[in-house]
Image: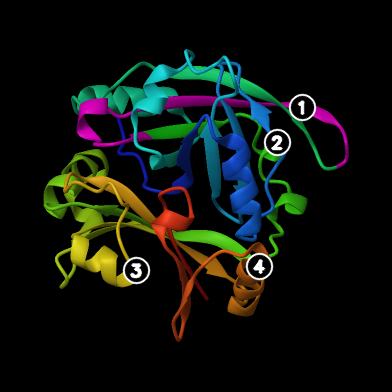
Amino acid sequence: MAISLPVPRLDHVVINVADQLDDASALFRRLGFQLTERGHHSLGSSNHLAIFGDNYLELLGFEAGRGNLRQDLWQSPIGLSGLVWKTEDADAVWRYLESQDIDGDQPASFFRPVTLPDGSEQEARFRTVRLRPSLVANGRSFFCQHDTPDSVWQDAWRIHPNGVSDIVEFVVVAQDPAAAAQPYSRLFGADKLTACQEGAFVLKAGVATVRFAAAEYVTQRFAGLPLDYDGSARMAGLSLRTTDLRKVKASLLLGDVPFREEESAIIVGAEQAFGVALRFQQ
């Protein structure tokens, strides 16, 4: 059986908030995001989502007394910890990862109950398969197969006070961007990664770009680095497309969140957003 290369397309990003789900969800609402009700995975973790057009943001943590479940998730630093790709066939991806010797655990199935905007109940069901953990510093990279996509992408959940419509950039900061990008060259093919003048490597992933960049780029574009950045590869920042920067500014002022305003972007530093630098742009 022929094994085809996966196609790079961002599905969602994961922000590890550990035992601080209440604080994190309150903060991201102050940042201007509409969040779904708290969900509880069959594996033990809990979450809130901010749903966009083609991708979404997940605040992932655990409730009191459940920190012993999925303990591997909480080893990453608080902040951006998951780069998640779309797939329609997790088992086919698993076979490909195995053939390239970059596989982690075998595909896992799980679910969480969901109340849809119309009040009906449904189970959101997923099947995921992960790259080998040793290839991804300070986080996870995996593929997600949505068996019930309508339990996630509801139009009513895509409307945000800050006008955000999609994640358009996912940034990994590293002293050696080429080394940080190398697993994704093996995963998707070397031709999918492009070297840029500023020393970064970029990977087009649907409406988003995944960028592996040095600290200088991240400091300039995102007004700083995570406070505990130690030079090792680290998922550090997101750029988000908004329909109107005035909506972003109004949300941040209402939420009393400090920000930096540029001519064509508004930046919220990592220290203001659970370790994730956020750049809002049109």
Q: Residue 61, percent across and down?
A: 53, 30
Tell me which numbered mark, 1 or 2, is placed earlier along the sequence.
1
Q: Nearer the viewer, residue 195 or 74?
A: 74
Q: Nearer the viewer, residue 38 or 195?
A: 38
- Foreground disc of the pair 3, 2: 3
Name the quarter where the N terminus is drawn.
top left
Q: Which mark is residue 251?
A: 4
The residue carrying mark 2 is 151
Question: Mark 1 and 2 residues: CB-CB less than 8 Å, in contact?
Answer: yes
Tell me which numbered mark, 3 or 2, is placed earlier along the sequence.
2
Question: Mark 4 and 3 residues: CB-CB less than 8 Å, in contact?
Answer: no
Answer whether residue 79 is magenta in the image: no
Q: Which mark is residue 122?
A: 1
Alpha carbon separation for disc pair 3 and 2: 36 Å
Could you classify mark 1 by the number of other residues whose Cα lies within 10 Å: few (under 14), some (14-19), or many (20 or more)?
some
Tell me which numbered mark, 4 or 2, is placed earlier along the sequence.
2
Q: Given the current orientation, which residue lies at the most extreme bottom position?
A: 263
Relative to 126, residue 54 above or below = below
Q: Secondary structure at mark 3?
A: loop
Q: Which amino acid type corresponds to the residue marked 1 in the rendered image?
A: Gln
Q: Which amino acid type corresponds to the residue marked 3 in the rendered image?
A: Ala
Quarter location, residue 46: top right
Residue at 28% over, 72% down = 220
Residue 2 appears left or right of 237: left
- Foreground disc of the pair 1, 4: 4
Q: Which amino acid type corresponds to the residue marked 4 in the rendered image?
A: Ser
Alpha carbon separation for disc pair 1 and 3: 41 Å
Alpha carbon separation for disc pair 4 and 2: 27 Å
Residue at 24% over, 48% down = 229
Residue numbers of the magenta segment: 118-141
Tell me which numbered mark, 1 or 3, is placed earlier along the sequence.
1
The residue carrying mark 3 is 223
